[in-house]
Amino acid sequence: MKRNSEQSIRHVILATGISSVVTQLLTIRESLTQFQGNEIIIALILFNWLVLGGIGTLAARLAARGTIRVSVERLAWLSLLIAALPVIQIGAIRMLRDIVFIHGVSVGFYPTLAYTFFLITPYCLLIGFVLPYSLFALRLEDPDYPGARVYILDNFGDITGGALFSFLLVFFCTPLQSIVLASALLLAAAVRLFVPPRIRRPGVVFGTLATAAVLLTGIYYETASLEPLEGQLVYYRESPYGRIIVQKDNRQYTLFEGGVPVFSNQNLITAEEAVHYPLSQIQRPRTILLLSSEGGVMQELAKYNLEHIDYLELDPNVTAVLQRFGLIQPVPNLQIFHRDGRSYLANSKQRYDAILVNLPEPETFQINRFFTDRFYQMARDHLNPGGVLSFSVAGYDNYLAEHQRQKVSSLYNTARNHFAHILMLPGQKIYFICRNVPVDPDIPARLAAKNIKTDYIDGFYYGNLTEQRIQGLNSLVDPDTPRNYDLMPHLMRMMFAQWFAKFSTSPHIFIGALLLGILAYLLRVRREEFVLFSTGWMTMGSEILVIFAFQVFFGYIYFQIGVIITVFLAGLLPGAYLGYRFARRQIPMLLLTDGLLILLLLGFIVTLGLAGDRIPSAFFLLFGFAVSLACGFQFPVALHLKKDNDPAAIRFFSADLMGAACGTLFTSLLMIPYLGLYWTTVSLIGLKLFSILILGATYARINAKAISVL
């Protein structure tokens, strides 16, 4: 093979890595927006991505056996297709969601899994297939070309793509602009693969122009692809923290952040309840802390002539949009902080008469962190004597379902650990009024004593919130329901179960089928493949751990998801390089890195327990880098163990991907919701201990054979 052909193939491998990671990150972010920020969607996308990639890699066996002819030109055509598909994929995610599912309704686990699976299938199968196919193309003229070198090239492209997206594209480009820029690199690299006489053929020219046309069309229809089925899109902006959209329907403006409706200018009932239920309890409120807001809240707060209102909103772009469309009105003594609520409380000494939490239902880890034992402790420590904390969850009409009763009980028991008196008020939302002095349920009377006029509360409170109904709700609390903690998120387990119960389904069927599939797979793999299977599981399990832990302590994973994935990719490259250099030592090196992974996980769990909120974000990134460094080290070592032939390369690529897919899904779907972060970490340690036992037995058997020969 000519030197320039080898270089062109290497450029294609690098460009494919860049494009695939940018596409993966944007697919995750688009899906988070389409499915209301549910972090489970991250795991489903990664699981489907890895499984499909593994299937694509296994399909490359056909090329290794000669069933599919290997040629540089075919690699060029595959690369053109891979360059065009991301635009189609992102467009399909945006436009098909409300066609496949009923507009505005919640979607169950199995439909979500199937929907994401089929949308990304073409792209992921090709991505999985093209990496070993590129290796075979390189070996056409150089049969000894190292498979580890292709692995390293692919990792370098992945890292470059992650860094490009996380530190540049996410700030300056829309999603489809980012896709086009990344795919344009692959388009240019693919064209170089066509040798000069063939590049002028009509088919090649047409394929190149068609790919370029698809990319340009994506940019042109960026905004049009976001038009809602109902109402009118009047504002759109991509923020590092989430997509911001304002829709107008008649005279009502609604702001959507990350796909979730968070503000409306016509929400009188919620505004009055959110403000007057808690503030009615305080004789003369002066200082208030607002964590997010509702339409009309500021006007209701203005009735109290407050001396100080601190309003926390993480994203400054959201605040600008709220003010532009009049969703929050300027009121005296209002001070806006663009900070995360928990970070603000952890670093502030300011005390308040009331803390009003106006957040959506705690269905995600990002929101759940404001409904945990640690948050209630922080809120209590920032209240003046007699101060009040108020928060709410979804209400009910006549009957409180068991899952909802357990959710309310968990919240009550958690808050009761820090507040002596808690009153729950039923309605469209269930409001929790928490104090260390008694709470008076006669809200209208207390407001009348303050001469504060309201529309909904004055006219409908006594009719809707009877004494019997209030007592009935408070009597339903189950004192044995576990509390909700940051690292043992009992509420998330319940919300997860409620998600399945809503659609009369269960995760057990899927988990059982997956376990049977894993068992069948493990019965066929060799010991070295199991080591890489467990390493892939460990890598993605640790990545999911970091993603969820980061969400718990910092709460803006939409922004940081690219950085976290990039860091995990970044460690693979130097790890693979070091493994390539020390591959001759084989099993001892595999044992050493398995032990290192166990020590890293032990350090992770101890740090979480001791430091908690004081952990800097850099810790999670350093941990991710160290884990991926050790995992990347193992691939070339295991490959060298089997003499780096084509069948071994395919099996090891596949084992790594399959393990990563299982680690992604089991960690997010089963371990974290049901076991919490602590026991999930312990489970990953147990997996690696089992890997060490298998490697140790293999090493002992090899040594025994060597001694018998002597």
Image (cartoon, helix red, strand yellow):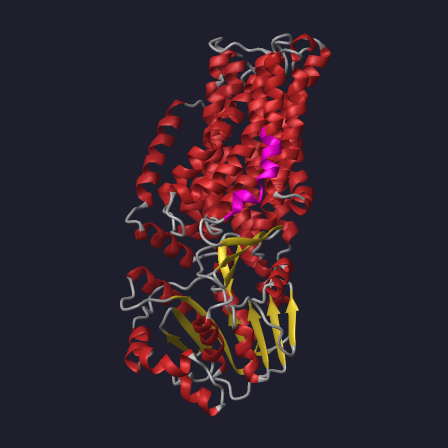
Drawn side of residue 481 relative to residue 419, left or right = left
Q: Is residue 466 above or below residue 594?
A: below
Percent position of residue 171, x then y: 67, 47
The reply to whether residue 685 is in sight is no
Residue visible at 64% across and 60% down in the picture: 316
Q: Residue at x 57, y 28 (%)?
A: 84
Q: Which residue is depicted at the point 53% across and 19% down?
A: 649
Q: Give the extent of the magenta segment.
A: 214-227
- Is 24 colored magenta in this rendering? no
Say left or right for 666 vs 535.
Answer: left
Q: Is residue 293 visible?
A: yes
Q: Nearer the viewer, residue 9 or 547?
A: 9
Inspect the magenta stretch and tell me whether residue 225 lies in it.
Answer: yes
Q: Is residue 59 above or below residue 694?
A: above
The image shows residue 343, relative to residue 557, as above or below, that is: below
On the image, the x and y values in percent for residue 23 come to 57, 35
Outermost residue toward the bottom in this view: 449
In which quadrant of the rendered view does residue 627 lie? top right
Q: Classify the position of the N terminus by image quarter.
A: top right
Q: Is residue 170 left or right of residue 126?
A: right
Q: Residue furthest front?
A: 250
When the figure is inspected, residue 249 is found, relative to residue 680, above or below; the finding is: below
Residue 680 location in percent, x, y?
46, 47
The residue lying toward the viewer, choosing from 507 and 455, is 455
Where residue 6 sits, quadrant-wise, is top right
Residue 585 appears left or right of 499:
right
| Majority secondary structure in the magenta region | helix
Q: Along the line of sight, which residue is nearer the eye, 316 or 532?
A: 316
Q: Position of residue 203 (x, y in %)?
A: 59, 14
